[in-house]
Image (cartoon, helix red, strand yellow):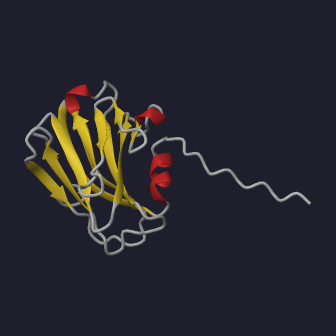
Amino acid sequence: MTPGSNIPLSAARVTVDVTAPVRLDVSGLLLTADGKVRSDDDFIFYNQPSGPGVTYRSGGGSAPDAIVVDTAAVPPGIEKIVVTASPDAAGQTFQGIEPTATIRNADDGSVLATFTPPQLGGETALVIVEVYQRSGQWKARAVGQGYANGLAGIATDFGVTVEEPAAAAPPQP
């Protein structure tokens, strides 16, 4: 796939795994027509591994992390599942470690499509693909949109509340 291209999904359950030469954090966001989550419960990742129709699957360090989408179980009102990735190491960018998303039939593992975003640089997080519904048909779109402000930047853009670390209290004299 190339950036912006899309394919119809031939399977009701798909897995999107994301590989790179470094460990990645992969997550999924369930979005409504306005491009936002309904609540923080629609942010699926290692600390919140399941939501309606969407599951995070850890690769355990030896296989890629993945987002599994069961399109038949996605609730009404959710029009898009955005799959994101960010390097696990704090502050690391995608410069020279371009990730590849592989979209598979979740039931038999067959490859439906692959996408490697071109020309990444200072991005620390990436919307790599979308699984979306249009006119009753589920499709996948190659995105490759980078963010320099990490996964928190992506989450905030899509309406997730991101808690900032508490500031240290000044020392008392």
Residue 69: x %, y % from top left: 24, 37
Q: Is residue 89 visible?
A: yes
Instruction: Provide residue 16's location: percent of width, then percent of height.
Output: 22, 48
Q: Nearer the viewer, residue 83 or 4?
A: 83
Q: Front-most of 172 and 130?
A: 172
In the picture, measured across the screen, residue 132 lies left or right of residue 137, that is right
Determine whether, in the image, residue 113 is placed left or right of residue 120: left
Q: Residue at x 30, y 47 (%)?
A: 58
Above-or-below relation of 133 to 170: above
Picture coordinates of residue 126, whole percent (x, y): 37, 58
Q: Which quadrant holds residue 72?
A: top left
- The answer to which image quadrant residue 1 occupies is bottom left
Q: Is residue 152 left or right of residue 13?
A: right
Q: Quadrant of the C terminus?
A: bottom right
Tell me which residue sits at (31%, 24%) in the image: 76
Residue nearest the observer in this picture, 111 or 77: 111
On the image, which quarter does residue 168 sit in? Answer: bottom right
Q: Residue furthest bottom?
A: 96
Q: Is residue 6 visible?
A: no
Q: Residue furthest top?
A: 76
Residue 151 % position (x, y): 45, 54
Q: Residue furthest right?
A: 173
How many tags in the picture? Answer: 0
Q: Residue at x 81, y 58 (%)?
A: 170
